[in-house]
Image (spheres, rainbow, N blue to C red):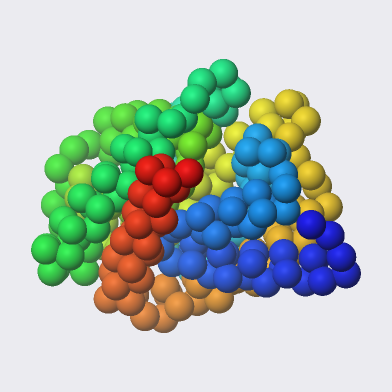
C-alpha cells in the first residue's frame, strides 16, 4: 500500500488512536491493523507500532505529570519491573506462538468490562488499597510488562482496572499512571524490535505525529471531565476490543 495519501492517512489514524488510547487504552487495536493492511509482516507491524506508540504514551505521560495527576517518583519500582517484563515479553514473542493469548484475552476483557459495568461507583473516587504498592508494582509490572511486549492489545485497560481495584485509584488517576507504564513498556519493546530490524521508521513517524496531537486532546478531556468521563469511554473501548479480538481469534 502506497501513494501520496498514505502519510496523511497514517497521521489521521495516529491522531484518533492517540486520543482514544490516552483516555481508556486500546489504541493498538486501531494502529496495528492499519500497518498489517499496508502489507507489513506481523513482527514489522508490532515493531513499527511500538515506535509510533512511544510518542502517544510519552506525550500523555508528560501532560499528566505536568498537571500533577501522576507522581513519577512513586512509579519508580513499577517502571523498573515493567521494563523488565516488557523485555522478556518482546524476546519471547519472537520464539513463541501467541495463539492461546489471542483467545484468552477477549474473555478477560469482557469479564473486566462486565465487572466495571455492574459496579456503578467503581473508579469514581479513590478507595482503600487492597495490596501494597510494592507488591502491586512487582506483580503487575512483570506480568503486564511481559504481556505488552509479547502481545499487547488491551494492556491499558488491564492496567487501569488493576490500579482502580487493587490500589484504590479513581479512573482519572489510574489512567495517568497507566500511561507511565505504557510508555515504559513501549520504549523497552521498541529497543528490542530495533535490534531485530522490525521497525519502519518513516511510516511510524507519520503516525507518531498524529499520536502527539491525539494524546494531547485525550489528556485534556480526562483532566477537564474526570473519572465520570473516563468510565463510559473505558467500558466502550473494552467491549469493542473484546469483540474485535474474539472475531480475529476464532475467525482468522
| Residue 44 visible, this angle | yes
Looking at the rendering, which quadrant does residue 208 occupy? bottom right
Going by the image, does 229 lie left or right of 184?
left
Query: Residue lying furthest right in this view?
Result: 4
Q: The N terminus lies in which quarter of the figure?
A: bottom right
Looking at the rendering, which quadrant does residue 101 occupy? top left
Instruction: Kindly identify the residue that appears in the image at 67 percent across and 54 percent down.
Output: 37
Question: Could you tell me residue 127's position as x and y percent?
Answer: 16, 57
Going by the image, does 134 lie left or right of 38?
left
Question: Could you tell me residue 210's position as x and y percent?
Answer: 68, 68
- Would you place residue 81 above or below residue 54 in this image? above
Query: Residue lying furthest top in this view?
Result: 95
Going by the image, does 123 lie left or right of 238?
left
Near-viewer residue (157 or 100): 100
Going by the image, does 157 lie left or right of 15?
left
Near-viewer residue (103 or 211): 103
Question: Could you tell me residue 30's position as x and y percent?
Answer: 55, 60
Total label count?
0
| Residue 157 visible, this angle | no
Instruction: Kindly identify the residue that appears in the image at 73 percent across and 26 percent down.
Output: 196
Query: Residue lying furthest bottom in this view?
Result: 224
Question: Could you tell me residue 116's position as x and y percent?
Answer: 19, 60
Near-viewer residue (64 or 190): 190
Instruction: Kindly identify the residue that appears in the image at 27 percent across and 30 percent down.
Output: 135
Instruction: Kindly identify the residue that appears in the image at 18 percent across and 38 percent down.
Output: 131
- Would you place residue 149 above or below residue 110 in this image? above
Amino acid at each position: 500500500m502506497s501513494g501520496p495519501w498514505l502519510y496523511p492517512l497514517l497521521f489521521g489514524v495516529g491522531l484518533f488512536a492517540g486520543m482514544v488510547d490516552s483516555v481508556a487504552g486500546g489504541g493498538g487495536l486501531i494502529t496495528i491493523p492499519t500497518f498489517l493492511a499496508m502489507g507489513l509482516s506481523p513482527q514489522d507491524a508490532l515493531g513499527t507500532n511500538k515506535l509510533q506508540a512511544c510518542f502517544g504514551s510519552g506525550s500523555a505521560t508528560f501532560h499528566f505529570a505536568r498537571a500533577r495527576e501522576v507522581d513519577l517518583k512513586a512509579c519508580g519500582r513499577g517502571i523498573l519491573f515493567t521494563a523488565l517484563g516488557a523485555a522478556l515479553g518482546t524476546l519471547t514473542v519472537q520464539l513463541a506462538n501467541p495463539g492461546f493469548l489471542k483467545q484468552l484475552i477477549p474473555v478477560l476483557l469482557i469479564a473486566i468490562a462486565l465487572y466495571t459495568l455492574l459496579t456503578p461507583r467503581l473508579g469514581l473516587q479513590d478507595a482503600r488499597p487492597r495490596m501494597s504498592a510494592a507488591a502491586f508494582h512487582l506483580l503487575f509490572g512483570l506480568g503486564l510488562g511481559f504481556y505488552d511486549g509479547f502481545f499487547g492489545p488491551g494492556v491499558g485497560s488491564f492496567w487501569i482496572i488493576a490500579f482502580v481495584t487493587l490500589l484504590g485509584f479513581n479512573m482519572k488517576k489510574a489512567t495517568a499512571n497507566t500511561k507511565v507504564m505504557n510508555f515504559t513498556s513501549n520504549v523497552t519493546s521498541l529497543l528490542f524490535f530495533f535490534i531485530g530490524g522490525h521497525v519502519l521508521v518513516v511510516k511510524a513517524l507519520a503516525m507518531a505525529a498524529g499520536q502527539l496531537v491525539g494524546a494531547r486532546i485525550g489528556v485534556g478531556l480526562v483532566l477537564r471531565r474526570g473519572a465520570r468521563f473516563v468510565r463510559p469511554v473505558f467500558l466502550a473501548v473494552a467491549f469493542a476490543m473484546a469483540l474485535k479480538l474474539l472475531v480475529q481469534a476464532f475467525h482468522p
